[in-house]
Image (cartoon, rainbow, N blue to C red):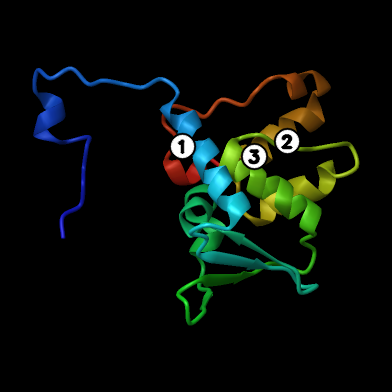
Amino acid sequence: MHRISYRNSQMFQSAMKPLKIENWASYILQRLMSLLEKGTKCDAVLQLADGKSFMAHSLILFTCSPYFDKPHHKLNDGSSVFLLPPETDDESLVAILRFMYTGKLDISHENFTRIHKLAKILQMHILVQFLASIKRSPVASTRSPQVPKSAHTADMC
């Protein structure tokens, strides 16, 4: 089986002009969120200590957080089960999952500390940095964080 490498491909080094659909990334994110909302193709279960569980796509989890690289339990259907720390609450988890899929964070003064703490636990570095900047400067809350051009995919969430 071959791995696809677009960066070193002869095709992209030739005189061909690459075409780009400007809103493609937005479309993919919207589609992924739709799949999550329907529970379609979800292959990961996030299990809270209180017994509640949430479905997600393992590829999204792995991309956004090195936390999900750790060993986990597999179900008979192939789904991965991730046991989350006892301090994880469902409201914060849902907000962070929505952020993973959309880049938008539903946050209020009341849930700020819990979401910030869970982002740290889940090792979502860019989200932790963004929330820390909001905490230091309320004016920063109106700006969107920028992903550094040198950031690796795993560091983006």
Label of residue 85 in the image: none
Quadrant into which the N terminus falls: bottom left
Instruction: Estimate the x, y position of residue 40 in percent, counting from the top left.
Output: 52, 57
Q: Amino acid at mark 2?
A: Leu
Is residue 123 visible from the viewing direction of this image?
no
Label of residue 127 in the image: 3
Residues at circles 3 and 2 in contact by the CB criterion of under 8 Å: yes
Instruction: Estimate the x, y position of residue 111 in percent, counting from the top left.
Output: 85, 45
Quadrant into which the C terminus falls: top right
Q: Amino acid at mark 3?
A: Leu
The residue mark sitting in front, 3 or 1, is: 1
Q: Going 89% across and 37% down the picture, which residue do you hit?
A: 109
Label of residue 131 in the image: 2
- Residue 8 lies left or right of residue 79; in this view the side is left
Q: Going 53% across and 54% down the picture, which residue do you hit?
A: 61
Label of residue 28 in the image: 1
